[in-house]
Image (cartoon, rainbow, N blue to C red):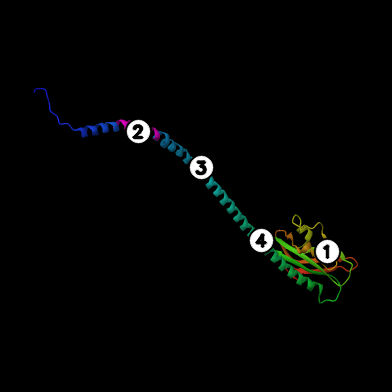
Amino acid sequence: MAGWEVRPSDPGRARRLRLLGLLLVLCIPLAFYAGSWWQQYIQPSAVVVQPGVPLRDEQLLREDDELRQQLAVVSSAEKLSQQANEQSRLTIKLLEEQIYKQQQDLAFYKGVLAPASRREGLRIKTFELQATDSPEHFRYKILLSRVGKGDAPLEGQLQVSIVGKQGEQDATLELAALTAGLPDALPGQSIDFAFKHFQAIPEAGRFAELKLPEGFIPREIKVRADVQGEKPLLRTFKWNKEE
């Protein structure tokens, strides 16, 4: 018979094709739904996370800055502690030197107040000199003492002069003139004193300064004490050596 074609019939295969087509139809809305879910949940999460990164960086920077400030404070405190320790060490050293000097002075003053001589009255104990870095500058100190147990203070005046040579000529210079313009400068040619046991000039056992004229060669120091009610007392000291 013309126009006819014989094909084998397979009902199972037809059912599978229909099921496959149905699955394909169902996959379309599922795919759309899945895409919407991804857009709604996954992508916003990524958007939220990214701004958090610079915020975290700022927090770390703040913490780092705070740690640096704390380190600076600790370092500063350590430096202050070191400076305080050094200052304490210097203070202790100074106090030890002062105690040692006072012990020396105490021993010296004990000798002053118990001399071998029995004659009572004023003593010009010493005229002490110290050189300095400058050839013309010297530091000096005078110590007066008293022998005896009188209650009334000894009062009087000292006159100090330096004898030497200026060029080829003998010259005598007053101590007051040699202290002009220097610390502890003498107000006049005479130095007033009043004491019971001993007195240092300048006060408190300090040293004063004197300056020799350029070219002056000192030889000796003459110290004259005029005491009320007593004869004048004169003592001569070699320059840097007692006579």
Tell which tag, 2 or 4, sits nearer the viewer: 2
Tell which tag, 3 or 1, sits nearer the viewer: 3
Considering only order in the chain, which callout, 4 or 3, is on the residue closer to the N terminus? 3
Q: Residues within 10 Å of mark 3 (few under 14, many from 20)?
A: few
Asked where in the image residue 132 lies, by quadrant, the reply is bottom right
Considering only order in the chain, which callout, 2 or 1, is on the residue closer to the N terminus? 2
Alpha carbon distance from label 4 to label 1: 42 Å
Q: Which residue type carries mark 2?
A: Leu
On the image, the x and y values in percent for residue 109 come to 78, 70
Q: Which residue is the site of mark 4? A: 88
Considering only order in the chain, which callout, 3 or 2, is on the residue closer to the N terminus? 2
Asked where in the image residue 27 lies, by quadrant, the reply is top left
Q: Vertically, is 54 above or below 229?
A: above
Q: Which residue is the site of mark 2? A: 30
Label 3: element kind: helix
- What kind of secondary structure does the magenta stretch mostly adopt? helix
* 224 or 16, nearer to the observer: 16
Horizontal relation, residue 227 to residue 68: left or right: right
Alpha carbon distance from label 3 to label 1: 81 Å
Q: Which residue is the site of mark 3? A: 58
Tell which tag, 2 or 3, sits nearer the viewer: 2
Q: Which residue type carries mark 1?
A: Leu
Alpha carbon distance from label 3 to label 4: 45 Å
Residue at image position (56%, 47%) is 66
On the image, the x and y values in percent for residue 213 come to 72, 58
Q: Which residue is the site of mark 1? A: 158
On the image, the x and y values in percent for residue 148 come to 86, 73
Tell which tag, 3 or 4, sits nearer the viewer: 3
Label 4: element kind: helix
Q: Which residue type carries mark 4?
A: Ser
